[in-house]
Amino acid sequence: MKHFVMCARPHRDIREGRFDLSVYAADLWSVFNGEGPEEYKNPQDFWNRTYITKGLRDLLDTVTKRLKGEGGDPVIQLQTPFGGGKTHSLIALYHKAREIRANVVAFVGTVFDPRDTRLWEEIERQLRGKVELLKGDISPGRDKVLKLLSEHQPLLILMDELLEYAVKCAGVEVGQSNLGAQTLAFMQELTEAVSLLPQTALVVSVPSSQLEYYDENAERMSQQLQKVVGRLEKVRTPIGDEEVPSVITKRLFEHIDQACARENIEEFLDYLERENLLLEDRHTYREKFLRSYPFQPEVIEVLYHRWGSFPSFQRTRGILRLLALVVYSLKDSVRPFIRLSDFDLSNKDIREELLKHIDRTYESVIAEDITDQSARAKKVDQELGDSYRPYRFGTRCATAIFMYSFSAGIDRGANVSELKLACAEPGVESSIIDTTLMHLEEKLFYLANSRNPYYFNSTPNLNRVLFAKLENIDPIKIKEKERSLLREALGGSQYFDIYLFPSDTKDIPDTDRLKLIVLENREDAKDYIDYCGQKPRVYKNVLFFLCPYEQERVGFQRQLAEGMAWQEIEQDTNLTLTEQDKRKVKEKVEDFKKGTKELLRRLYRLVIYPGKEKVEEIDLGMPVRGIERIDKEIYDRLRSENVIYEKITPLYIDNQFLITGEYIPTKPLLEVFYKTPGMPRLSSKDVLKNSICEGVEKKFFGLGVLSEDGLVCKYFGTLAEPSFEEGEILIKRELCIEEKEEEIEPIPFEEDKAEGQVNQPKDDSSYGSPPTIDLIDTEHSRHSIREFRLRVKVPAGRLPDVARTLRLIPEKFEEVELRLEVIAHRGNITKQLLQNTIEEGLRQAGCYIEEWKPVEDA
């Protein structure tokens, strides 16, 4: 799409930024005296910048006929809202009368002081150059007026701001009456005289809206004036609402290429139809857009009907002043047309042009939420991601909401469809505006707590209250809350003895129970492994440490503080909240309480434990939704990665501890699992007990004692339970076979084989050297796997588990080739979002995409 200045060329003064905003305030008296801007006093410039509306053309034709003596209405009243084109129409009549060499009288009520100037005297002064016939404080009567006017036909009398003059006259005493009453009497005499003269016309502008009245006396004066002059006058409205866009564009642009404009508009309409954003039929919207181009139709509508409802805005005049500034600010942009979201509120001139019609407190609203470097809308610009950052949807959407927020009437705010239209960006799916609005609701301080419509308010919303609470939350309280939540989340564990932030290694008892120790600094773990106070620690292999993932610290503290702030808001009885606000606060507090475990788990995700040669670490990764207990997740993860065992097979004990020796004492055997880093961690003492019982029953080894007479095998092939007392031993199976019993190789049950293959420690070379742990077939533990191929079908919800499991592969194999095939059906996602999230994410992860076939709906 082409840049709008290629289709619509602004007038030179706008292009060069030399325009004086006062030129948009037409002044009949200045033009009458040959003063003021060239575009008003110079007839050619004036007509070049004037769009001749139907109402204005009818007015010019009627007055011209009257002045030529060809009929036409003698008295005409121009009645439009303030700034609706009355004065501009009077100037047009002035230039037309001069063209046909008619005499012109101009009277502007704001110019004259009734204590010095009487209306009837001023008319005679302009016609004769002196005052004789109509001199005095009393209205002169119809005959004198008729005599004066008849001598100067063809004659056009133009009166602007007559109401203001009449209101002032009411304050000047004249005998038992006042000058206001005399002025009303004169207007009646004047209208009668004009109606009797075939080549004389009187055109009077009277405001149509009571919003322009100064007080009740002014309203009463207006009604009286209407009654007096309304008997003979014809009421005209020079500009119809549908003609306002054409008037605006004619005034601001010296040339508009309709073909170029139509090309941009048609492409935009195609986009609107694809996004289902057209609120009316295509033909109607196209015609509206062609009249308003380069402005989107909604720009003119909002300014004319909403902002124009403020008396100070002055409708057409106000729009011209504002849009001249907007066009100049955008002349070097690449926008194909101008939307409400394109208004640059950081531009002081544009901002001031708006603020003078509303409460000045909105200056700080604009700054905090939209324009400052740290403005909340700008934060949303960043949050939407790299793909959308150039479009500044946060700032633009907030700007559009602001422009829709004000009216002297009942209209206020914009709905989602209107905002999508105001921020429409061909080539970008409009659903991004839904996302933007959700972010703005959470960020902006002065966005009203009403989703439909959206509008700004000068009263701070809950976001601002939340921000104030956050500023006052002591970091010490945040730390206390963190520890409190950890105690609550980890308390009553059935898997570990829990210790939170011990201050000394002696605070952790040196016992054989599994322990989970929460530390702030992971580097401290080594001291706790090596020492218990001043003594070397004995039971090292039962220690696990839970440490924070420091990259998550800032986000954790922010969310924790925010949750605490919502709780403070809920408890603050001094706040006056709406019912809607109260519901939102309650929801936020409930969400915070429900999400504390997940919040903690996002930070505390590093599990550290002593390994055979070094301290090992497991990163639990990001939590899944609906986490029950953190300690259970840690336990399950350690069990799945063969760090903690709930069962070991007799085959493992036989191969590991009896392969080179004749026996092994049961008590030291149990102790070695507790004390030696790198050995399998037993979930309980029963793990080893059950394995021994099974091994004795299945004749993997015998259970007996060491006596003075040597080894005594008491149990072999029978039920037995070890006591782990001094003297109790496991005996190599060959020594337990009775002399008469045939020596037969024991055959492990099928479940023994399976257990040995799937979740059992591998053999090591000797009892004294702690074994390492791998997922390897125990029976073939002395052989290395050089290569393998694996193909699995993964449940969609278990992808994180699979990713954790596969991490072992690149650690053990130098060359690894991983391929991922995804087949997804019955989806509900846009193509652009799919590309921005899935495709872009894979590329950033360094993946080469071999095949990519998204299927769009027909």
Image: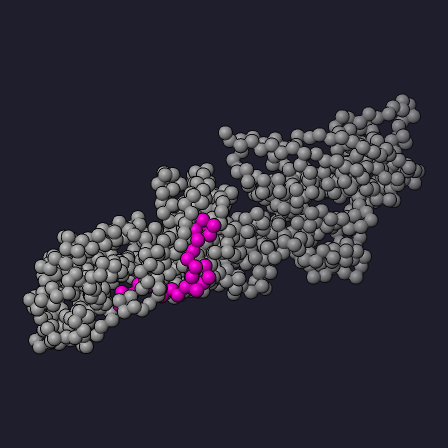
Q: Is residue 588 visible?
A: no
Residue 28 shows in the view: yes
Q: In the image, residue 820 lies at what x, y percent? A: 67, 34
Between residue 364 and residue 525, name the one nearer to us.
364
**Position of 394 relative to 352 (above/below):** above
Residue 193: quarter of image: bottom left
Q: Is residue 40 left or right of residue 173?
A: right
Query: Could you say where residue 475 lies in the image, as x and y percent from the top left?
Result: 58, 63
The x, y position of residue 137, in whole percent, is 11, 75
Residue furthest out toward the front: 101
Identify the residue shown where x is 35% and y is 41%.
Answer: 284
Could you tell me which residue is drawn at 78 percent across and 42 percent down?
A: 811
Image coordinates of residue 499 in percent, x first then y, are: 67, 54
The residue nearer to you, when weighing 753 against 122, is 122
Q: Is 9 within the magenta?
A: yes
Against 363, residue 442 (above or below) is above
Residue span colored magenta: 4-29
